[in-house]
Amino acid sequence: MSEDKKVKKEELTQCDECCSKELKRVPDKGEVWCLDCGLVHKEQRIEANDNGAALFGENAHYQSVRNDGDINRSIGGTGPKMKFGSKGVRDRRKYHLLEKIDRSSVRNPHPFARRVKKNTETLYGRNTLHLLEWLIDMACKPLTAEQELIRKKQNKSMNTRLGMPKQSICRKEKGIKGTSEEQNAVIIAAAIVELAGELGLMPKFDRRATMEQAGIVPKQIMNARIRILQHWKARVSMGWAAMPPRKSANDRREDAIVQAMEHIFDMLDGHLEREDFERVLYETEARLALLQEGTGQALTINVEERMLVSVCVYASLVTFGLQSGAADLLADVFGLTSSGIRSRFDALVKQSESGELQDNGAFDMKQTCKELLNESQKQNALIAKFRLGRVCGKRPTSSES
């Protein structure tokens, strides 16, 4: 039999379902559309110039679609079982037709990854999505077929870590996973953004706004973050990915102090008059500069960042006689205790007076730190970073109003 006869025999002449001969061929997609019932047929007779490699297999660029938008809208995208129910089908012929059409509809191969990307853009901005899209794909899409074969040959521990993080996160017990697919997507988006901030891929974001908006808790974000990092490290060990350089301890401390400053002064903005707010802000900045925080020579390196900032702000409030009830407000920001802040403040003041703590006068309460700080010296890097954040739109200053 000649090649021409073989090709002619393979050509579709009528619809498999309704037997209609009103067919439309779409060679670039390798499909034949029935113009009467909307069924899409696969046409495997592909010529070399039809770019067949892009039509079939796991690397296909195209997928089957219904060509009639009106049919699409009238049927809906949830399949025939939603229309007829799993029991009591009265018109089986129509049921099977709708089932075939539903199977021929286009499917997003990774809908959950798209949902995570959408939440990332909504919560953190388009630039964040552009920076972290590859990390979202790594967490929410399976390994390639070749990588999966290699994974199956690994030991149990490596096999587990190479598994898709999304599956592990979404199958945890209640209270760790979200209550819905949407909440799971928010948890993974928040975990990826937080992980990127910790690794230095981008600035850190405050998780509290996300948790309040989505109704999630810290342990959910932390669980997802740990699982994604484990998977990432497993990929690195297999040579399938590379880890970014880690931030130094000094850089991480600087970031933590800047973030703590933001949280506290966001709170104080609603409790202090503008003039008092500015005085306390600049006094706190000067106090941290005297302590050389933000550098490798920080004098209070052994004090935890949130406690240090809370004590420095409390000391600034004491300097201007604004400390009434302030310890309680500061404690609420980070879940500390007001007695803990006051006792640490008293201890640092005593250590400064006795000379046990070399603080450059940061806790000398006889004068303001702004007077002690030499304005001609090079500006402290941490203070410059915090001021830059304020200039970029956090809050207006008195000079701007």
Image (cartoon, rainbow, N blue to C red):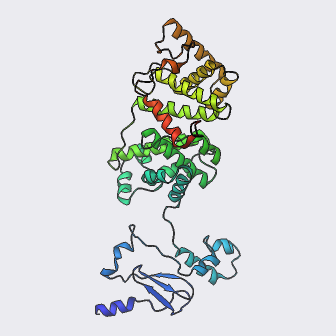
Looking at the image, residue 113 lies above or below residue 94:
above
For the C terminus, which image quadrant?
A: top right
Query: Which of the 4 image quarters holds residue 210?
Result: top right
* As drawn, 376 above or below 205: above
Q: On the picture, is 302 further left or further right than 209?
A: left
Res 340 seen here: no
Taking the spot 31% from the left edge, 92% from the top edge, the residue there is 4
x%, y% of residue 165?
Answer: 48, 49
Q: Position of residue 312 (x, y in %)?
A: 56, 22
* Residue displayed at 60% across by 80% down: 71
- Picture residue at 56% right of the left edge, 41% below the top: 394
**Where, quadrant-wise, is the N terminus in this rendering?**
bottom left
Farthest residue toward the top? 354
Instruction: Check the image and report above or below for 84 versus 156.
Output: below
Q: How many marks?
A: 0
Q: Is residue 154 above or below residue 264?
A: below
Question: Could you say where residue 115 lies in the image, as x and y percent from the top left?
Answer: 54, 57
* Residue under the point 56% across and 81% down: 68
- Horizontal side of 280 relative to 288 (left or right) equals right
